[in-house]
Amino acid sequence: MAPRVNLSKMSLKDLLTLQEELEQEIANARLRERQEVLSRMEELAQEAGFSMNELVGGKGRKGKGSASAAKYANPDNRAETWTGRGRKPNWLVDKLKKGGNIEDYAI
């Protein structure tokens, strides 16, 4: 278990920094655990002789077409992604304004 921190003795600036770091780590943990579950699901599907697409994707989906895979990710928060379709997300617009190249963020 992590050491206890006395939050009541921290400054507002330190608390906000801690909040930012926690949000980042929570997003990273969510992405990491999602990938682990997806990998286990793929293994189970293969063992049973199916592909993941046969079990959860493919035909029969209702609504707006099929979901696209993410092509770009925010290096500061890997949970923020963009498929390359539609409007660019704010994180990408900001990075491009600062001189970044879109290929720098390709997955």
Image (cartoon, rainbow, N blue to C red):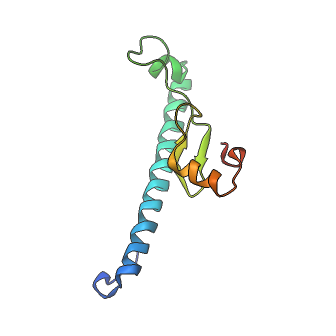
Q: Is residue 90 visible?
A: yes
User: Residue drawn at (57%, 58%), measured in percent from left and top?
Assistant: 76
Residue extending furthest top?
Answer: 60
| Quarter placement of the N terminus | bottom left
Q: In screen coordinates, is 31 left or right of 103?
A: left
Q: Position of residue 101 (x, y in %)?
A: 71, 49
In the picture shown, does residue 65 fall above or below 103?
above
User: Residue drawn at (35%, 85%), measured in percent from left and top?
Assistant: 10
In the picture shown, does residue 26 fall above or below 56?
below
Q: Position of residue 87 (x, y in %)?
A: 52, 36
In the picture shown, does residue 61 fall above or below 68?
above
Q: In screen coordinates, is 97 left or right of 1?
A: right
Q: Position of residue 99 (x, y in %)?
A: 69, 55
Residue extending furthest bottom?
Answer: 9
The answer to which of 11 and 23 lies nearer the viewer is: 11
Quarter where residue 5 is shown:
bottom left
Q: Position of residue 68 (x, y in %)?
A: 54, 28
In the picture shown, does residue 39 fall above or below 44?
below
Q: Is residue 4 visible?
A: no
Residue extending furthest left?
Answer: 8
User: Residue drawn at (54%, 43%), measured in percent from left and top?
Assistant: 81
- Label total for image: 0
| Quarter placement of the C terminus | top right
Q: In screen coordinates, is 1 left or right of 41?
A: left
